[in-house]
Amino acid sequence: MKDALQKVTAEIEHGTAKLGWDRPPALYALVKTSTLLGQPDLPPDIAQQVRAEWDGGDNHLSAILQEQMPEDNIEEMLPRLAWPEDVLGAVVCVERVIVPPEVEQQAPDDEDAAIEFISNHPQRAEVRLVVSALRSGETWSMIRARDFDADETVASGDNLVPQLAELLTASLTPDHD
């Protein structure tokens, strides 16, 4: 399933990159493509598109964009999620401003002042994080920096955004409340 997770995460990252920057957060449910195609209420045009992208394998995953997410803090929203059993995983896509750890340690304690400090720091970087997780605990992340916005500069790996990956994984655990 790890290969399927990596593939669907890359598809989401690449599709989001085509839309450009300054996008709202997005959340996707991951289901087996064969399960999705077995849904009797799946519109024919969607079924045709899904079949065209399906490799025919039992582990192929399809991403289903969820309703527009509230502009809440994602870290606060993820623990409140509950997924149906046929959802094998989830992907979250969000843009953030990051700074090196030593700069973060210099930020004021006041949240508003810290946001202002980090947002205006010369070492800040704007990034898009695409983080995915499966119920089995497997995760995959991709990071695209706005200053180096090219497909060949996208970083990917298991543990690039550990806090977000842990929250996403926990949201998939039935007893996470």
Image (tube, grey):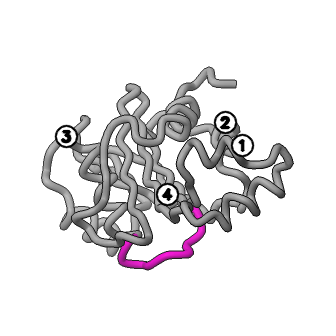
Q: Residues within 10 Å of mark 2 (few under 14, many from 20)?
A: some
SS class, disc 4: strand
Q: Earlier in the sequence, mark 2 or mark 4?
A: 2
Relative to 12, is 34 above or below? above
Alpha-carbon span between mark 2 and mark 1: 6 Å
Which residue is identified by label 4?
Answer: 93
Q: Which mark is residue 76?
A: 1
Q: Are marks 3 and 2 in contact (CB under 8 Å)?
A: no
Q: Residue at x 40, y 41 (%)?
A: 160
Contact check, label 2 and label 1, Cβ < 8 Å:
yes
Can you tell which quarter of the image residue 69 is in? bottom right
Q: Position of residue 17 (x, y in %)?
A: 38, 72
Boundaries of the magenta span:
17-25
Residue kind at label 2, given as amino acid type: Pro
Task: Report x, y in % for residue 123.
Answer: 54, 61
Which residue bears the numbered disc 3? Answer: 58
Crowding near the residue tagged with mark 4, few <14, some 14–19, many ≥20 C-alpha atoms within 10 Å:
many
Assign the N terminus to one quadrant of the image.
Answer: top left
Which quarter of the picture shows residue 78? top right
